[in-house]
Image (cartoon, helix red, strand yellow):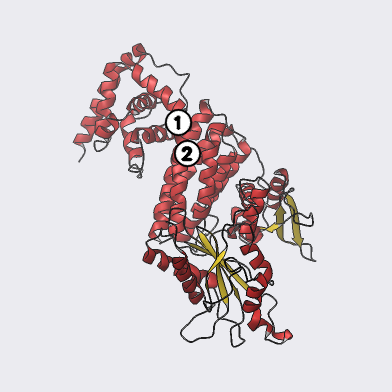
Amino acid sequence: MIPSVNDSGSRTIGLLAYLYGPGKLEEHTDPHLVASFDGMSPDPGRDPNATLKDLQQLLDQPVMALPQYRRPAKHVWHTSVRADPRDRILSDEEWAGIARRIVAATGIDPGDGQPGCRWAAVRHADDHIHIVATLVTEDGHRPDDYRSGTRAQAEARLIEKELGLHEVDPGDGTAAQRPTSAERHKAERQGRERTAREELRETVRRAVAGAAGEEEFFDRLAAAGLLIRKRVAPSGDLLGYKVALPDDRNKDGEPVFFPGARLAPDLSLPRIRERWSADTGDQDAVPAELPSRTAPGGPSAARRRTASAAWQALIVIERGDEAVAAAHIASAGEVLDALATTSAAHTRAELRAAAAAFERASRSHVRAERGHDRALRQAARDLVHSGPALGRGEDGASTAMAIDMLFFLVTAAIHWHAKKGHAQQAEAARRAAEHLRAAYQAAASQPLGALYQRGRRLGRPLLHRQNALLREAVPELAEQVLAEPGWYALAATLADVEAAGHDPADLLAAVARRRELATADSVSDVLVWRLRRSAGLPADTSDTVTTDRATERTTDRSGRRAESRSGARQRRP
């Protein structure tokens, strides 16, 4: 159940006309009162002799009784209370009880003999009600409605438990502002899937990802087609910014601008500047552009560096100071945005959904200590400036490698938020992880398929030796890995590791110690990507041919090396 307290208004009659009207898209059905301050208020929806004017005058009476100079300019209080889509349809009597509890909890009508405001609860749909009140009590004072939104949320949590409704995760005030009902209706009229506020938030978030300073940030906003207004002090210093969609206009035909802070708390200019100043190593320095906007090595190299940065960030989140961990979690959101922006078509939708979901997980009351997260921010920058990746070959395979490690980074964020009681953030990270899982499956199908086929072509003696190597290096995982289809891809990778001059048993044992294998759908897949990244092997092997004859020639010699290595371990003190 979600109460949403709106900004105070000035016209009671205008709000009532909307609540009792057909709605913007004829969506209002059977508007009627379910409760009111006295239980006897006129109901224009059910009583043919009652008018909107009658109800408005009754509600406004305490306001109008005050001298003109004492009347508040914004005297109309309004909140909607919406049930979760999974909840049963509540009766009018249940909604009436909910309305009474909300106005009591928020201080609008506290009860227990205390003077309250006049209010009415209108229902015009199965799943929600609207409560309208006038902010002058019966004795002519302002009600104690401080933090009425937070108080309404707390009461809603109690109502959910008592009525057996779906229990919404409690928030902490760090979520981005939700679109208003007017914004949602406007989007529907314009045929948009999302509101202007939501589109702007995503565009600004992507523009921030990996940006090195104000010039690059505003260049990206302009390139995305947004209208930009900058707030400049008389000294010439930039104080803030607003953005608008070119085709989102008000009734006067003017663009509707949103300040960054109204899109999300961390998108205000001061909060964005914290990232840039930390990148310079001097918190008081003016942000400077990095020397080059070109990431060396192209998209595949950028994705490999992303995987490495994600692995280091995972360790920090598990072991580091909470402020530093919070910075890495915030920067993980930048990396997801950058990866989604440069992704190939077959992974784009899921990666964008993952980035959008993780946006909520990137903020909490733990203030991020910027600067320690430079590697992740550089990874985001490299992704953006390396350009879009192809969905095949080394680009596609390295994308799977990066997604695989980002999945574990997001999983670490889930655990971190859960330990701190950040329920909404933990749930958002879980949703992001599910989208990453789907994106990984799309990205990994071709490169792992090629490795699987190579593994199937390995000679029986070499497969037998890889089996023994697996049991020697990770005995606790061996049976699970051997039962997975990905075992053949791992066997081929172990052959590549040895051909590159590495000790496959030692390297396999090392990468298996890197935790978080329990959450993987396929342990063998995870080990493949970790081995290939650690050994510097190509992620894509679709053009590689490993013949049985070539592998058979090395079987005896490498087998003897493995046996010797095992014996040496047994002789160590």
User: Reading the chain from its start, which is encountered first: label 1 or label 2?
Assistant: 2
* Residue occupying the point 72% across, 57% down: 257
* Residue occupying the point 35% across, 21% down: 455
Say which quarter of the image contains residue 284.
Answer: bottom right
User: For the residue marked with disc 1, what is the amino acid?
Assistant: Ala
Residue 212 visible in the snapshot: no
* Residue occupying the point 75% across, 54% down: 255
Residue 65 visible in the snapshot: yes
Q: Is residue 483 above or below residue 52?
A: above
On the image, numbered disc 1 is attached to which residue? Answer: 444
Picture coordinates of residue 9, whole percent (x, y):
66, 70
Q: Nearer the viewer, residue 40 or 192?
A: 40
Question: Does dot 2 land on a helix, a strand or a loop?
Answer: helix
Picture coordinates of residue 370, whole percent (x, y):
55, 57
Residue 428 is marked as: none
In the drawing, does residue 192 fall left or right of residue 359? Answer: right
Residue furthest top as drawn: 549
Q: Nearer the viewer, residue 452 or 133?
A: 133
Using the numbered discs, state the Cα–Cα distance from disc 1 to disc 2 in whole angstroms. Answer: 9 Å
Picture coordinates of residue 417, whole percent (x, y):
42, 57
Q: Is residue 559 above or below residue 385?
A: above
User: For the residue marked with disc 2, what is the amino acid?
Assistant: Ile
On the image, numbered disc 2 is attached to which residue? Answer: 403
Labels 1 & 2 near each other (Cβ < 8 A): yes
Say which quarter of the image contains residue 555.
Answer: top left
